[in-house]
Amino acid sequence: MKSSVIILHKKFEGFPTESNFELVQEDVPPLKDGEFLAQAEYVSVDPYMRVFPVEVGKPVGGDQVAKIIESKNEKYPVGKYVVGEFGWRTHTVASETPGSFFNFPPRVLRGYGDLPKSLGLGILGMPGNTAYFGFLRICKPVEGNTVVVSGAAGCVGSTVGQIAKIMKCKVVGITGSDIKGRRLISEFNFDAYVNYKSPNFQHELTEATPDKVDCYFDNVGGEVSSAVLNRMNKFGRVAICGAISTYNNVPGKASEVQTPVKIAHVRMEGFSVTRWRNQWDEGIQQNMEWIRQGNLKYAECISDGFENTAKAFIDLFGAGDRNFGKVVVKV
């Protein structure tokens, strides 16, 4: 059996392009005791992959939802589905050994019922838990707080905003598209949005946050975040999840924020969701319960065909209105 694999052909310089990747074929070795063979059904593409270190010539890393088609491990029976750090490949010989980035062993999907299994890569997986733990444990929202979320149209951002509404907060999303912003309000219960591409961004942010900002969930960094940090209330809380505006080495300068942060006694904390690995199922189960109650919605942007994985990843950084929610590739 052969496995199709997408490897890093050359290191990134600026925005990723098709020339950074190469599709190759590899032989699938026979199983040893304790191993199983997983066939990919959905492959994840995420912004962090742009800065995650991968050696040239090695497969691009990341999670996938895969079906077990052969097994010599009773914990992973044939026919079950798993989320595993198998990277961009169609077939993987795996075991209970943890992956190299999130350091999780493959996790068998359970309790999905009629929900799509692809959610294991989104709201019922790493992004959903990033939103759940990062927002609740670091921002510690209180009813009536004003919450601002940057990167609000992504899977993490849209989930944070909805959890904030469940906590009875006012929620303002920052995104780069009026179409996406209107969807945040009409479909995801946000109170308002601000388009960071607007020439009047700072004025519109001020209008959207008349009581200033109590909690800021930061996915983008850069000048957008500087503007929000200048709007923080005293003892505001900031969760630093990512800085996608800097991932492609785009030159730029952000305004100084130390003074407003100091004056308002703002607490800023960076995090990786892996710090809550021992509570992982709590986030998944709570998000699943909110979904079934109708309080938490999800959106997926699905590309068809494993050969289109690199393109789906490239589009994360500039596909306009198309990319909303979690981007996955259906193999």
Image: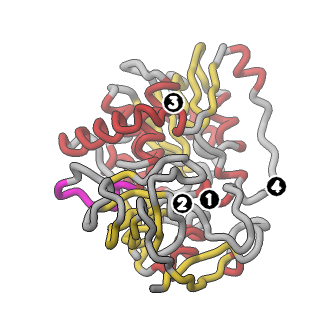
Q: Which residues are magenta?
A: 113-120
The residue positioned farthest toward the front in the image shown: 33
Q: Earlier in the sequence, mark 2 or mark 1?
A: 1
Disc 3: which residue? 209
Disc 1: which residue? 49
Graded by Cα atoms within 10 Å as few (under 14), some (14 to 19) or many (20 or more), the crowding at tag 3 reads: many
Position of 165 compared to 200: left or right? left
Q: Is residue 139 visible?
A: yes
Graded by Cα atoms within 10 Å as few (under 14), some (14 to 19) or many (20 or more), the crowding at tag 2 reads: many
Cα distance in 3D space between marks 2 and 4: 27 Å
Disc 2: which residue? 62
Q: Residue at x 56, y 76 (%)?
A: 311
Tags 2 and 1 touching, CB below 8 Å: yes
Percent coordinates x, y for residue 88 in the rendering: 53, 70
Q: Residue at x 54, y 33 (%)?
A: 275
The amino acid type found where label 3 is placed reads Thr
The amino acid type found where label 4 is placed reads Pro
Q: Secondary structure at mark 1?
A: helix
